[in-house]
Amino acid sequence: MTALAPADGSMLGRWWWTVDRLTLTALLLLIAVGMLMTVAASPAVAVRIGLDPYAFVRRQLLFLPAASALMLGVSLLGPRGVRRLALAGFAASFALTAATLVVGAEIKGARRWLAFPGLSLQPSEFLKPCFAVLTAWLFAEGQRAGRWLGAAGACLLLALVLAVLKLQPDIGMAAVVLGVFLAQWFVAGLRLFWVGVLAALMVGVAVAAYSFFPHVQSRVHRFLDPSSGDTYQVATALAAFANGGLTGRGPGEGRVKGILPDAHADFVFAVAGEEFGMLVCLAILALFAVVVIRGFLRLLAEMDAFVIIAATGLLTQFGLQAFINMASSLHLIPTKGMTLPFVSYGGSSVFAVALGMGMLLALTRRRNHGEAG
């Protein structure tokens, strides 16, 4: 293909020969898995709540291609473009997240969603990738102008985000944001003494969350002692994995999707385990591992502090979200309502992950040293 020859100087040509094609392939395969799992898991859920069997399928088959286009479009940007997009995205998503406290729909005691005609939006999903890039920018600028200035600005930004997430409340997302922030700060040069101090602080925050938030306390109790409360979803998910065995019951033969409330979203991994078996689940896990490990390997040759810190945040966020979802389904950690990136149903999650992965692909493209892009 002449248009994509190595010497081609067009935007598309430069993109093709500088983007990490292995990471891109793994992400596109995860999107394909998401399409397959939507078809497999969502019709039974739709029928159970009185919708057309293919209501979720039609929506997700619109969301996923559009999200793919978003990811590819963002990946064309250079680091400067990524910073500008993150700044605009953070301002918009923070304002909308704050708006949920006033006009958001209350679901299970939390206000995390904005309702629009024919659409529900969880703006806090978009806060995560934009926040990771902005804090990386502050840390990198702080290294040039004075480390404490960058760290102080990043901590102030963190406090604002944690405050609005606590008011919703969304303690799980707040914990993810805090974990990603600390990973970035460590990469930015945080001393080991302060790492220990912050680790102790995180333990204190976890204890406080357990003490003051009844839903957190309930989840921990049910994890440690299943007989202490309702563990229906986790027990059903574990039974699905057992029923699937090594190779699964076969496409469309699963039973868990007919009785599990969140089979198409938070527990889609259990549907994959029952219908396609452990081998396919391991293949899905391998795709997430490829994205994370390949991304960090790509950073070994990187010299730009902003790129290193921002990509670290995006990769940590992506891997941590995948781990929390799969580990919750397998009862390895207390349950947390968090989607499996690109695989679970949900427009807000799919587009937010696409935005973050588009930024990652853009930042990890090969550039000449000193190129700002």
Image: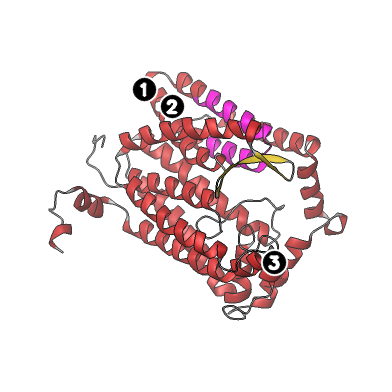
Q: Secondary structure at mark 2?
A: helix
**Structural crowding at the residue carrying mark 3, measured as other residues with C-alpha within 10 Å and reported as few (<14), some (14–19) or many (≥20):** some
Q: Name the amino acid type tagged 3.
A: Arg
User: CB of mark 1 within 8 Å of CB of mark 3?
Assistant: no
Q: Earlier in the sequence, mark 2 or mark 3?
A: 3
Q: Name the amino acid type tagged 1.
A: Arg
Q: Which quadrant does the C terminus fall into?
A: top left
Taking the spot 53% from the left edge, 48% from the top edge, the residue there is: 348
In terms of image quadrants, where is residue 322? Answer: bottom right
Q: Which residue is mark 2?
A: 138
Relative image position of residue 175 (x, y in whole percent): 63, 40
Q: Which residue is mark 1?
A: 144
Relative image position of residue 285 (x, y in whole percent): 53, 63
337 relative to 331, above or below: above
Q: Which quadrant does the N terminus fall into?
A: bottom left
Q: Taking 69 as reference, is 250 left or right?
A: right
Main SS type for the magenta part?
A: helix
Q: Taking 340 as reference, is 297 left or right?
A: left
Q: Earlier in the sequence, mark 2 or mark 1?
A: 2
The magenta stretch is 154-183
Q: Which residue is mark 3?
A: 48
